[in-house]
């Protein structure tokens, strides 16, 4: 079940949902309009699931940065969001989609009990200039069914990280003979 604007507002008031910074003007009927943060990691080398990803980190200036096709960018949400009660789904929106931007690569789920600035895996269809703190997509909150477990307490790979993080699969594959 998706939370409406009224339900998100009520959950913010009780502390069941945190969005920091929170701007009520960014609420739409069923979502919160989140923003792109200022830091980008440019991953333009070869990727290997068993090794840490190499990258160069840059700050997006006020005049913007052009995203190029064929490059994987790891970005971050401007807002830190979390809930011990609701699951979250982060996606792009009609506007970023129309600019040919993918805001993540098939990873929309935010677990109950994970309060974070989200890592974004950004790709561009065509060269496109993006700006820090521009609206980048929609975040929805979902009521859960069944017993809840907090990601923070269940040993998730990313429980100890906040903000941009590279794939941590290499930590699981480290002792794996190949
Ligand atoms: O694009 C994304 C997707 C998820 N997350 C955060 C929210 C989520 O709570 C956590 C873990 O996501 P997921 O379960 O998809 O990651 P995993 O690779 O399966 O790791 P784990 O084994 O810890 O579940 O990472 C992001 O920051 N960016």
Image: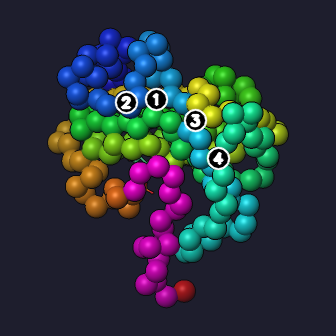
Dot placed on the residue nearer the N-terminal end, 2 or 1: 2
Q: Where is residue 162 in the image (x, y as percent from the top left)?
A: 41, 51
Q: Does the residue labelled 4 lie within 8 Å of ligand 1?
A: no
Query: Which of these two is toward me, 114 or 132?
Result: 132
Residue 22, above or below 49? above
Say whether residue 100 is left or right of residue 120. right
Q: Is mark 1 within 8 Å of ligand 1?
A: no
Residue position for label 3: 36
| Label 4 crowd (10 A; few <14 / some 14-19 / many >=20) | few
Q: Answer whether residue 135 is magenta in the image.
A: no
User: Pointer 4 and pointer 3: residues touching (CB < 8 Å)?
Assistant: no
Q: Residue 59 carries which label?
A: 4
Dot placed on the residue nearer the N-terminal end, 3 or 2: 2
Dot placed on the residue nearer the N-terminal end, 4 or 3: 3
Say whether residue 24 is left or right of residue 98. left
Residue position for label 1: 139
Quadrant of residue 15 in the image?
top left
At a point 72% along the width and 25% down the height, the residue shown is: 98
User: Pointer 2 and pointer 1: residues touching (CB < 8 Å)?
Assistant: yes
Under circle 1, the secondary element is strand
| Closer to the eye: label 4 or 3 | 4
Per the model, the C-alpha gap separating discs 1 and 3 is 12 Å
Residue 127, above or below 74? above
Dot placed on the residue nearer the N-terminal end, 4 or 1: 4
| Closer to the eye: label 1 or 3 | 3
Per the model, the C-alpha gap separating discs 2 and 1 is 10 Å
């Amino acid at each position: 079940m998706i939370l409406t604007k009224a339900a998100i507002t009520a959950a913010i008031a009780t502390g069941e949902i945190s969005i920091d910074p929170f701007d009520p003007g960014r609420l739409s009927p069923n979502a919160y309009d989140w923003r792109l943060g200022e830091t980008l990691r440019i991953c333009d080398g070869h990727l290997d699931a068993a090794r840490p990803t190499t990258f160069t980190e840059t700050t997006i200036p006020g005049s913007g940065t052009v995203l190029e096709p064929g490059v994987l960018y790891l970005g971050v949400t401007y807002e830190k969001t979390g809930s011990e009660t609701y699951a979250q789904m982060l996606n792009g929106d009609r506007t970023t989609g129309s600019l040919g931007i993918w805001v993540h690569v098939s990873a929309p789920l935010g677990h109950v009990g994970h309060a974070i600035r989200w890592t974004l895996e950004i790709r561009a269809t065509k060269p496109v200039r993006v700006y820090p703190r521009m609206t980048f997509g929609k975040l929805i909150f979902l009521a859960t069914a069944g017993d809840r477990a907090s990601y923070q307490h269940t040993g998730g790979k990313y429980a100890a990280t906040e903000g941009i993080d590279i794939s941590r699969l290499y930590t699981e594959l480290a002792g794996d003979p190949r």
